Amino acid sequence: MRITAIRDLVVPIKSSIRNAFIDFSQMTASIVGVQSDVLRDGAPLIGYGFNSNGRYSQSGILRDRFIPRLLKAEPDALLNAAGDNLDPARAWDFMMANEKPGGHGERSVAVGALDMALWDLVAKIEGLPLYQLLGQRYRSGEYDDDVFVYAAGGYYYPGKDTRALQDEIKTYRDLGYIKVKIKIGGESLDDDRRRIEAALEVVGDGQGLAVDANGRFDLKTALTYAAALAQYDLFWYEEAGDPLDYRLNAALATATEVPLATGENLFSTIDATNLIRYGGLRPDKDFLQFDPALSYGLVEYLRTLDMLAESGWSPRRCVPHGGHQFALHIAAGLQLGGNESYPHVFQPFGGFGDDIPIIDGRIQPPQVPGIGFELKADLMAELCSLF
């Protein structure tokens, strides 16, 4: 058994949306495919992956460093102990050979895309949906049959008023989502309050709504917003300040009873560790949003979960960012607290299988071997262009 080819392409996911910090008018993503010599129905099995949204394509370091390292490895060196499947952890070690500690911004995204493809391929070789494979390996055979998901949207669009925001949220409710998230920090506080109150008219109460500032605020502004948000009893207040400003986060946690959510822009276990050490987060109240596809993949995410357990955190407080099928399987297989979803944006990568319904805010992972990209037609049209 061996890897016979690895390919990558850059695809656009640009749109007119913006959050409080960036717009997505020039956004791209990398897609990757890892082909094996294992045949099913006469065709070689291929694992697919891509980098999660919000970070640009990684073609340079994929082609210069990480893909060549995998292809140069002796085939047996990438196999598990039984020799009957690939071992993503061994592949990870080859990808990260001769890489210095630190520098987790772009490198972690490239490795995460390849790690996704490797896990897709491993599960296909095993003939299991990835979440079931993960439950068998890491949860003594236990896994969740369905997963809580919330609809992420509410971006700032040119000319979009509160009525249009309400119409958008109604589409999420019609799809079966119970909780939704909207952006704040891109307009004035008064404007954001109007948007929040318009959203609440649709979702009914604050526990149906989360807000996300995308790291925009300094401490004074973060605290001002926290005081204004207190009256709404929101599901969470997300990423008020810079993701590495642990002091800001700790001060905010001390000053508000509103649940906080953060972590999507921390790309390594050591960064996650520092957040837990110094960020003041409350294990019984707050949420952790580390995105496996941005942070060196599932191999590193397993280390992060081990650290959290040692620090007194339940995996149920983890709700990964990204809105992709990889995180959905991880949430089910490792029994996390849920997963983000992008029903309308970041297509074709956002959302899940075409015919898998959202029922009372929960979704069942795809019941096919691997991650199940094959059940999302528009995404497979992109992935099939690799080979």
Image (cartoon, rainbow, N blue to C red):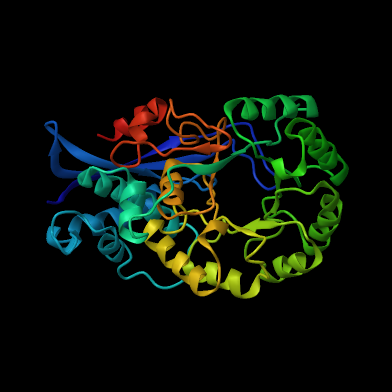
Towards the viewer: 164 or 172: 172
The location of residue 97, given as percent across then percent down, is 30, 68
* Residue 209 seen in the figure: no
The location of residue 183, given as percent across then percent down, is 71, 42
Quadrant showing the C terminus: top left
Report whether 160 appears left or right of 65: right
Number of dots carrying numbers: 0
**Res 259 → quadrant:** bottom right
In the image, residue 178 sits, relative to residue 327, either above or below, namely: above
The location of residue 14, given as percent across then percent down, is 54, 34
Report whether 281 appears left or right of 224: left
* Residue 89 seen in the figure: yes
Towards the viewer: 7 or 320: 320
Report whether 338 appears left or right of 34: right
Q: Residue at x 44, y 54 (%)?
A: 109
In the image, residue 327 sits, relative to residue 351, either above or below, namely: below
Q: Residue at x 19, y 60 (%)?
A: 78
Q: Residue at x 14, y 61 (%)?
A: 82
The location of residue 314, given as percent across then percent down, is 54, 63
Towards the viewer: 52 or 39: 39
Q: Residue at x 13, y 59 (%)?
A: 83
Report whether 56 appears left or right of 210: left
In the image, residue 46 sits, relative to residue 380, either above or below, namely: below
Towards the viewer: 24 or 321: 321
